[in-house]
Image (spheres, rainbow, N blue to C red):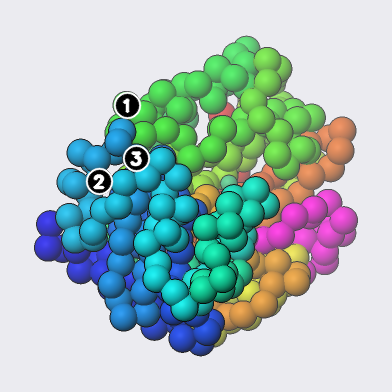
Amino acid sequence: MALSDTRFSNRRRALAAKLASQRVDTMLVTHLIHVRYLSGFSGSNGAVLVNKDLSAKISTDGRYFTQIAEEVPDIEMVEGRNPGLSLLKQVEGPRRVGFEADFVSVSALEQLKEAAGEEIALVPISGVIEEIRLTKDPLELERLGLVADLANSSLAELIAEGGLRAGISEKQVAADLEYRMRMKGAERPSFDTIVASGPNSAKPHHGASDRIIEHGDLVTIDFGAHDRGFNSDTTRTFVIGEASDFAKEIYQVVLEAQLQGVEAAVPGAALADVDKACRDVITAAGYGEYFVHSTGHGVGLDLHEAPYAATTGTGVLAPGMTLTIEPGIYVPGKGGVRIEDTLVITEGVPKNLTRGLPKELQVL
Ligand code: ZN
Ligand code: ZN
């Protein structure tokens, strides 16, 4: 399709433009998410070679020949069971070839060095494609919006139909939610759904256990859908039956922190300041020591990707970036609350991809 050709070649152009500053002639891309980002190929074995003159080659093995011809009509294909190695062998020296330092294993690097010989210098490159991925194009934003709607409407339906209640297990709620997301067209959840009830809600990354949900529990559900390469990420915390004073108190603090974080997420804002906007509310309420993680992350082809809103965060927000705002309070033995939206940073008020799920305390 003409549309997709332009999209992928634009990304390769952006990469080629960065190669000179990295002092390389060619970039060997082996991380599968990056292969897909730069070419459209979605198979499980592949690599792409992008030269600074914009010429490119792609490689995969026989299982994917039909698929790659459909998905990548505009790049010359080289057969290879080890695609990275096959592409490197295509390079004629002398050349400086960049490789993805964050994604090449020690043994794979040994193989590449052997194939490179004396004419080709292998140069470790880090974060360059990630930097291009920071700013989403309109089609990426559309797909992120669709996958978010699919996931969030699934939870809204589950809640409306009484799918979260006392007497059933965390695993059953997770299974129900994942089934609904798949029935709406998700390829899979973007991660194992978290359903953390009662004392489990005090563990930020609890999974979903056999624990039976009880009257009075706080229940945190953190979930997302994955489709066509893209992910969504949302968290809501509910109370079952009746909210204790403790539950009401920490819920209001987290909600206020979350709203402050959303307000702070404007173009030009330092990522550390977005984190601080959330953290200050929680600290002022006396729960600072119980907010044990950072405020948020980008969402795209990876569930967790740059930018990162953390106390140690660097850089500033710009239009086209995504960012979750997900403060939480976790008091061991008592319970916890987390509220998470995924935002798209725009020139004005951020666009909130988390729709149809109220943030006020819901007692079910
Ligand atoms: Zn999440
Ligand atoms: Zn998240």
The image position of residue 235, as x and y in percent, is 57, 44
**Residue density around tag 1, few if under 14, some if 14–19, many if 20 or more, within 10 Å:** few
Q: Residue at x 36, y 74 (%)?
A: 51
Quadrant holding the C terminus: top right
| Of the pair 2 and 281, the residue shown nearer to us | 2
Q: Residue at x 54, y 25 (%)?
A: 174
The image position of residue 200, as x and y in percent, is 75, 30
**Residue 50 in the figure: left or right of residue 208:** left
Which label sits on residue 61?
A: 3
Quadrant holding the N terminus: bottom left
**Cβ atoms at labels 3 and 1 below 8 Å apart:** no
Residue 226 against residue 347 in the figure, above or below: above
**Residue density around tag 2, few if under 14, some if 14–19, many if 20 or more, within 10 Å:** many
Distance of label 3 from label 1 (alpha carbons): 32 Å
Distance of label 1 from label 2 (alpha carbons): 28 Å
Q: Residue at x 68, y 15 (%)?
A: 210
Distance of label 3 from label 2 (alpha carbons): 10 Å
| Of the pair 157 and 360, the residue shown nearer to us | 157
Whether the magenta-drawn stretch holds residue 281 is answered as yes
Which label sits on residue 68?
A: 2
Sequence-earlier tag: 3 or 2: 3
Mark 1: which secondary structure? Answer: helix
Whether the magenta-drawn stretch holds residue 198 is answered as no
Sequence-earlier tag: 3 or 1: 3
| Image quarter of residue 112 | bottom right
The mark closer to the camera, 3 or 1, is 3
Magenta region: which residues? 280-297
Mark 3: which secondary structure? Answer: loop
Query: Disc 1 designates what residue?
Result: 183
The mark closer to the camera, 3 or 2, is 3
